[in-house]
Amino acid sequence: MALKESRQSAAWQQHIKSHQESGLSRPEYCRKHGLKLHQFTYQIQRLQKPSNAAKPCAFARVVVNEAIVSANSLPFSARLVLASGMCIELSPAADPAWIAKLLIQMKGLS
């Protein structure tokens, strides 16, 4: 079965290469060679898709800086800027429940 699939892939790859060299549109090329346009398009997408082995790693190295600034030393911990230009700065000591209520009220104003 793998040999048959390999031959079919090689045949489609040859068609794709020939199409690119022909200068014809996909529909014209398919009519000329007796191919179904939807199958040809599918094979182009399938064969030109990068393989899983070629995908870059999804992880990145993270370096932790030991000099972490205390949240309490910051003048504010969050800044909300609204479309109107209004700016709300929240201190690190702001109560999370109060912030949630504020956001719900602000949502009602929009």
Image (cartoon, rainbow, N blue to C red):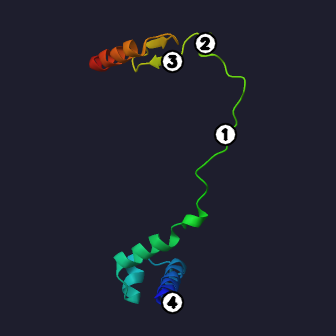
Q: Amino acid at mark 1?
A: Val
Residue 27 position, x and y percent, is 37, 78
Q: Measured along the vertical axis of the image, is residue 68 above or below residue 29?
A: above
Q: Measured along the vertical axis of the image, is residue 62 above or below residue 2?
A: above
- Label 3 sits on a secondary structure element that is strand
Q: Please give the count of numbered marks on the rendered protein.
A: 4
- Label 1 sits on a secondary structure element that is loop
Q: Is residue 29 left or right of residue 77?
A: left
Which residue is found at the position 49% from the left and 12% from the top? 89
Distance between mark 3 and mark 2 Cα atoms: 10 Å
Residue 94 position, x and y percent, is 46, 11
Provide the residue designation for mark 1. 62
Q: Amino acid at mark 2?
A: Leu
Q: Which mark is residue 3?
A: 4
Distance between mark 1 and mark 3 Cα atoms: 24 Å
Distance between mark 4 and mark 1 Cα atoms: 44 Å
Which residue is found at the position 33% from the left and 15% from the top? 101
Which residue is found at the position 55% from the left and 67% from the top? 51
Distance between mark 4 and mark 3 Cα atoms: 61 Å
Identity of the residue furthest to the right in this view: 66
Q: Amino acid at mark 3?
A: Ala
Q: Amino acid at mark 4?
A: Leu
Q: Which mark is residue 74?
A: 2
In this rendered view, identify the residue nearer to me: 110 or 102.
Answer: 102
Which sits earlier in the primary sequence, circle 2 or circle 1? 1
Name the quarter where the C terminus is drawn. top left
Q: Residue 81 occupies which quadrant of the picture?
A: top left
Provide the residue designation for mark 3. 78
Distance between mark 2 and mark 1 Cα atoms: 24 Å
Residue 84 position, x and y percent, is 39, 17
Which sits earlier in the primary sequence, circle 4 or circle 3? 4
Q: Badges 4 and 3: C-beta atoms under 8 Å apart?
A: no
